[in-house]
Image: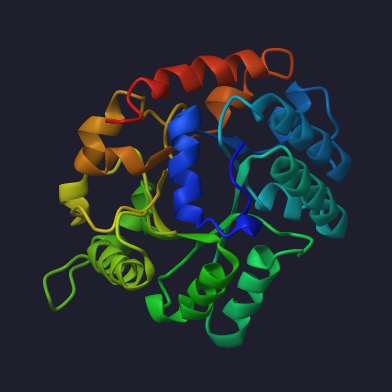
Amino acid sequence: MTSPAGDGTPFGERVRSGIAAHGRLCVGIDPHVPLLQEWGLDASAAGAREFGLRVVDAAAGRVAIVKPQVSFFERYGSAGFAALEDVLAAARDAGLLVIADAKRGDIGSTMDAYAEAWLTPGSPLEADALTANPFLGVGTLEGTFDLAERAHKGVFVLAATSNPDAFTAQRARLGTGETVSGAIVREVAARNARITPEGEWGSLGFVVGGTVDWTDAGLSPFAPVAPILGPGFGHQGAEPEHVRSRFGEMAPAVIASESRSILAAGPDRLAARITERALLYRGDRHA
């Protein structure tokens, strides 16, 4: 079981403990239509809810972290959000750390309201962390960072995603010579340094794809250590052995997110597949 936010443990330290106890695998909860059909479930809010609860049951005790993809619930409107609320609550009740993959990004009070929806203790959509889009400016996330700090929550800032269409914007060079990705990491890491006690992990993390070349992206190691959410493992081609080679000295902080490579096993083999994949990562959790 991971420590709950209510005990005052910062999110970064809860991730650190979760990786130490269960390894770095994060199970995505992505009830897209083909998978619902393969699982014998309706393409509906009820089907998404059942799918999500089954994944939670299979993941509990086998991994530390799950990541519901909000869009696959949102597509069903208010009923979909109600289903997501049940899945989020069940996961947190099971002692799992929950990353709401919503990729919210806006300015001013609008972004603050998004943060309140996902990071406020007791909110119907309460999660342990939220993915956030900084490409309107890292400063637009200040209110989100403040709320996360007060509530002992986490934020994963998109930094270097692996989708080819993102390269133009993320690899662009600023007047300083930095890439946009590198500048984002520098700014957020500096905030972590101001608020994180010495020796602890920061709670403002980064999304860096498991297939990303750090040199090409203009990234370099940062301090203090903070969680790195690494999509792209499993189905998209990154494998456990790539954690060390691609993330280098930051490898201990990597959360390897897998979705389709696990969920495609179907409901009957889901728990076994999670165990199989988790074991592959545990060997290098101290990489």
**Relative to the observer, which residue lies in front, 253 or 10?**
10
Image quarter for residue 118?
bottom right
- Looking at the figure, which quarter contains the C terminus? top left
Image quarter for residue 239?
top left
Would you say 107 lies left or right of 119 here? left
Regarding residue 43, the answer to whether it shows in the image is no
Q: Residue at the left extreme?
A: 177
* Picture coordinates of residue 17, whole percent (x, y): 47, 40
* Picture coordinates of residue 223, whole percent (x, y): 24, 58
Regarding residue 245, the answer to whether it shows in the image is yes
Image quarter for residue 136?
bottom left
Q: Residue drawn at (49%, 30%), measured in percent from left and top? A: 21
Q: Residue drawn at (53%, 24%), measured in percent from left and top? A: 261
Above or below, 26 against 198 in this view is: above
Q: Residue drawn at (41%, 57%), measured in percent from left and top? A: 205
Would you say 244 lies left or right of 150 here? left
Count of marks overlaid on the render: 0
Above or below, 16 against 138 in this view is: above
- Looking at the figure, which quarter contains the N terminus? top right
* Picture coordinates of residue 67, whole percent (x, y): 59, 43
* Picture coordinates of residue 102, whole percent (x, y): 60, 58
Q: Residue drawn at (38%, 71%), measured in percent from left and top? A: 195
**Relative to the observer, which residue lies in front, 115 or 15?**
15
Above or below, 67 against 112 in this view is: above
Q: Residue at the bottom extreme?
A: 108
Would you say 141 lies left or right of 166 here? right
Q: How is the image coloured?
A: rainbow
